[in-house]
Image (cartoon, rainbow, N blue to C red):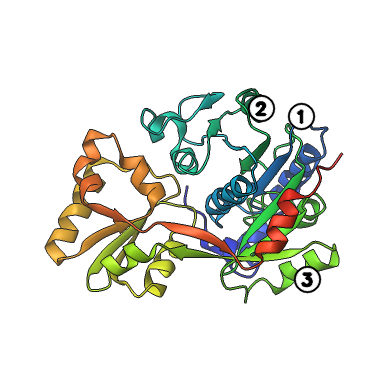
Amino acid sequence: MREPAFWWNSPGLTSGLLSPLAAVYGAVAAARMARPAQDAGIPVICVGNPTLGGAGKTPAAITISKILVAAGRRPFLLSRGYGGRLAGPIVVDAAHHRAADVGDEPLLLARAAPTIVSRDRVAGAAAARAAGADVVVMDDGFQSPGLGKDRSILVVDGRRGIGNGKVFPAGPLRAPFAVQLVRTDALLIVGNSADTSGVTAAAQASNLPVLHGRLVPDPAAVAAFKTRKVLAFAGIGDPEKFFATVRNAGIAAPVCKTFADHHPFTGEEAAALVMQAEHEGLSLLTTEKDHVRMTGNPLLAALCARAHTLPVTMAFDDDDKVRGLLLAKRRR
């Protein structure tokens, strides 16, 4: 599903017409978040998103796991495995599993630390603990009530903020923002925060720390494309975020193709991308998340072989503050 444009504009007629449905959805989401949660027996750090759509959760979770490893901890990453057929709990094996098995994001997470896919997050945390984890880092699941969280970080895109501030389907919020803030330990603003002054003010009024981060493209990949023009394509929560990263890195991208989040590319789409790139003399450039979805699919072999990736990492502007939050004594 592609998110509607009105979510990210000032409230208008469409969002107003959908407000009654949004009120019901928001009430249900708030009641669900208030349910009692189960203790994992080890600390659980949740990296969530107050809105539908991409904001940088997965890169943030990866960087957080690396900070924990550097501090001598044994983190396991936990994902629901959206788009995968395996319910889990199962430890992701990048050499064996494909996106069709475990989803695309877990394959990226598994490059940083042991990763478990489980639709039942309580069972997933238990499996992580049994496998030797001393801390669990959840990629998403903030609004899910089953597993208790010791620390929760909400990730907000600095360019889009929380959109029109309305709850789904009138807007992009997964639950009323105020309801989410009271269960949050910190807000992470990713990128330019010009459109997030209201969000920042709300967090500060709740005495929540506001962290800042940015997505940093891999220097070697950027250097390889400095003298080339690319056809950039992405099927992620916010493709424009990827295109902006490409442009800001100084890479010329005269053609950008947008697909829905977690889009399963077809053979016809793959052939069309390859043909257009060849016809216009462009190199194909995509995200790591999109690339892992192609891997192992014979219908996409030609696209997978020709498409280059622009890896990005999350860099925090407040390293000491982030580290202190992550390593603080576990809440009771």
Residue that mark 1 sits on? 41
88 vs 191: above or below: above
Disc 2 is placed on an element classified as helix
Q: Residue at x 21, y 62 (%)?
A: 283
**Place of residue 236 in the rendered image (x, y in percent of width and height, measured from the top left):** 45, 52
Establish if 58 lies above or below 122: below
Between 159 and 223, the one nearer to me in the picture: 223
The CA distance from mark 3 to mark 2 is 37 Å
Q: Nearer the viewer, residue 202 or 3?
A: 202
Residue at image mark 2: 129
Q: Residues within 10 Å of mark 2 (few under 14, many from 20)?
A: some
Q: Secondary structure at mark 1?
A: loop
Q: Reading the chain from its start, which is encountered first: label 3 or label 2? A: 2
N-terminal label among 2 and 1: 1
Residue closest to the eye, 273 or 183: 183
Residue appearing at x 43%, y 67% in the figure: 245
In this rendering, position of residue 153 left or right of residue 117: right
Q: Amino acid at mark 2?
A: Arg
The 10 Å Cα crowd at callout 3, few under 14, some 14 to 19, many 20 or more, is few
Quadrant of the drawing holding the C terminus:
top right
The residue wearing badge 3 is: 201
Q: Are marks 2 and 1 in contact (CB under 8 Å)?
A: yes
